Amino acid sequence: MIQHGIHVLDWPPYSPDLIPIEHIWWWLKVAINERYPDLTIGGRSARDLEVLQEAIVECWQYIDQAKIDSLFSTMHHRMQAVVDAQGWYTKY
């Protein structure tokens, strides 16, 4: 489709999010919530921010590299699922 002289791509409204970092952020969030449950009720002081930053650094180290490798090694399956679904919903 062309609008105002510009080719516009048809984009499905429910296209899957295949960005691997989204999964990794989720794992990091879970690790922080498990190890530092009090952070969810913390305030917004400079100390609270410092504790959060320390928690992020610590918990990042606990994300299993094998999980990350597995996530990336299955990307071809994820991409093929999107192609097969013609850009619509997939199990990913």
Image: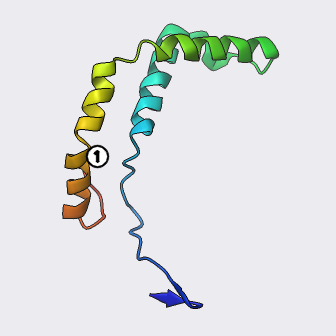
**Total numbered badges shown on the rendered structure:** 1
Q: Amino acid at mark 1?
A: Tyr
Q: Residue at x 25, y 30 (%)?
A: 70
Mark 1, Cα crowd under 10 Å, few <14 / some 14-19 / many 20+, is few
Compared to 60, does 24 lie above or below? below
Image height check: is 46 above or below 70? Answer: above
Can you tell which quarter of the image residue 38 is in?
top right
The quadrant of the picture occupied by the N terminus is bottom left
Q: Give 82 or 39, whichever is nearer the viewer.
A: 82
| Residue drawn at 72 percent across, 13 percent down | 50
Where in the figure is residue 19, as x and y percent of width and height?
41, 45
Q: What percent of the width, then of the height, locates residue 25?
A: 47, 31
Element type where label 1 sits in the image: loop
Judging by the rendered image, the residue that carries numbered circle 1 is 92
Identity of the residue drawn at 58% across and 12% down = 55
Percent of width and height locating residue 39: 63, 15
The answer to whether 59 is drawn above or below residue 70 in the figure is above
Residue 39 or residue 1, whichever sits in front: 1
| Residue closest to the far right | 45
Residue at (77, 11) in percent of width and height: 47
Question: Coloring scheme of the render?
Answer: rainbow
Residue 87 located left or right of residue 63: left
